[in-house]
Structure formats: structure tokens, C-alpha cells
Image: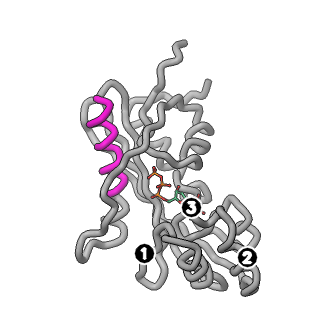
Amino acid sequence: MTDEPDILLASASPRRRELLDLLGVRYRAWSADIDESRLADEAPDAYVERLARAKAAAGRQAHGNERPVLGADTIVLLDGDILGKPRDRAHARDMFSRLAGRHHEVLTAVAVVATDGRVFGAINRTRVEFGEVPAHWVDHYATLDEPMDKAGAYAVQGLAGQWIQRVEGSYTGVMGLPLFETAELLRQAGLALTGR
Ligand SMILES: Cc1cn([C@H]2C[C@H](O)[C@@H](COP(=O)(O)OP(=O)(O)OP(=O)(O)O)O2)c(=O)[nH]c1=O
């Protein structure tokens, strides 16, 4: 047994670290700084997949091919619009009030570059249904830190969870790293995932 990490996690997201911990994977975390702009006419699933792959590729470029590299990206889709992270509190308030009382989709793409350079990718689509949220609560929520670094300006795993009536798909996908797909990709890249 060594203390060497099994993979490089090309992510600064504390949620992705927590979720990877559940798989018993040892990782070194490194924050990939990539251009997240969307290409003209790029479909949402192509966009989120491209970003996950770009984060993994940046990790491999910076740290070499000694271990597999994992990157992920999450977006919220509503009426054909992509909701990423809010720019500021007013934007967070607008995003959250659009989601209240309706359903939307969360797309999380995961990409793993194996040590031999093969790239394994998957995308998780989950439907999330919000109950009605009182306007005063939306106003209050936008004053908190919780929505500020989250796609769609809410955290299913946080205070906003009290308004989520139904999740059809993967809860961990909504949180930023779908465990079913992630485990499969890591096995494809040669990890045993037997826990420790
Ligand atoms: C919808 C939703 C998103 N999120 C988070 C997961 C991601 O961290 C974030 C989406 O932003 P991303 O751009 O996917 O990721 P990130 O910038 O936080 O981290 P990195 O690029 O370094 O990997 O939103 C939640 O934590 N809970 C939720 O319910």
C-alpha cells in the first residue's frame, strides 16, 4: 500500500472531491483553468462534454501521463438556455427564480484520460423538479454564498434541497460527479475500485 494518488482530479470543486472520496479513489486535485466559452451553435451536450475533456487534457498536459486524469463539467438546461454559474447576486436571484416551481435538466459530463492516452467519456442527464418557492425565500437565498459557485445558482445538497420535489436520474450527477458513470470510466482506465 502506497500513499501515491491513483488519479489526478482536474477540478477545484469541493463537491467533486467529496464524491470521489466515496469511491475510495486516492487523488491529487489540481484546478484546470480553461476557456469555458461556448462555441457558436454548439449543442449543450457537446459543450459540456468538450469542457470535461478540456479539463482532463489540461491536467495531463500539466502533470504528465503517470496516472489517469479526470475532468468534469456541469450545466443546467432550462427552455433551451444554458445556466452556468451566476455572475453576481442579482444573476443568482434571476436564475433561481426561473427554476422555482418548474423542472429542468442538469447535464454533467465526465472525461477520463488513461495513462496510454485513450479518452473515456460519459454524460449524465438528470431531471430536477422544484416545488413553488416563496419570493421572499428566493430573495434571501441570493444573499447567501451557497448559490454563488453552483451551476443554476443552487445546491441540491444544500439549503435549496428543501425545495426539490423530485430528482429523476442521478443525485450525484446533479452535485457535479455522477458516481455510476464515473466508476465505469475509472474501471475502463484500469482502476480496480475495491475501496481501501
Ligand atoms: C446544480 C448543482 C451544481 N453544483 C456545482 C457542481 C460544480 O462544482 C458546479 C458547476 O461548475 P463547473 O464549472 O462544472 O465546475 P467548477 O468550476 O465548480 O469546478 P472545476 O471546473 O474546477 O471542476 O456547480 C452543486 O454543487 N450542486 C448542484 O445542485
Tell me residue 113's x, y (percent). Answer: 32, 39
Q: Which of marks 2 and 1 is in front?
A: 2
SS class of the residue under badge 2?
A: helix
Question: Where, quadrant-wise, is the C terminus in this rendering?
Answer: top right
According to the picture, the residue beneath numbered tag 2 turns out to be: 140
Tell me residue 142's x, y (percent). Answer: 65, 74
Q: Which residue is drawn at 58% across and 65% down?
A: 148
According to the picture, the residue beneath numbered tag 1 turns out to be: 82
Q: In which quarter of the image is residue 40?
A: bottom left
Magenta stretch holds residue 52: yes
How dense is the environment of label 2, judged by Cα within 10 Å: few (below 14), some, or many (20 and up)?
few
Kind of residue at disc 1: Ile
Magenta stretch holds residue 91: no
Q: How many marks?
A: 3
Report the magenta residues as a range. Answer: 51-64
Query: Residue 174's mark?
Result: 3
SS class of the residue under badge 3?
A: helix
- Toward the viewer: 163 or 149? 149
Tell me residue 179's x, y (percent). Answer: 55, 48
Kind of residue at disc 3: Val
Question: Where, quadrant-wise, is the N terminus in this rendering?
Answer: top right
Q: Is residue 134 left or right of residue 122?
A: right
**Distance from label 3 to label 2 (Cα)?**
22 Å
Q: In which quarter of the image is residue 41?
A: bottom left
Q: Residue at x 59, y 54 (%)?
A: 172
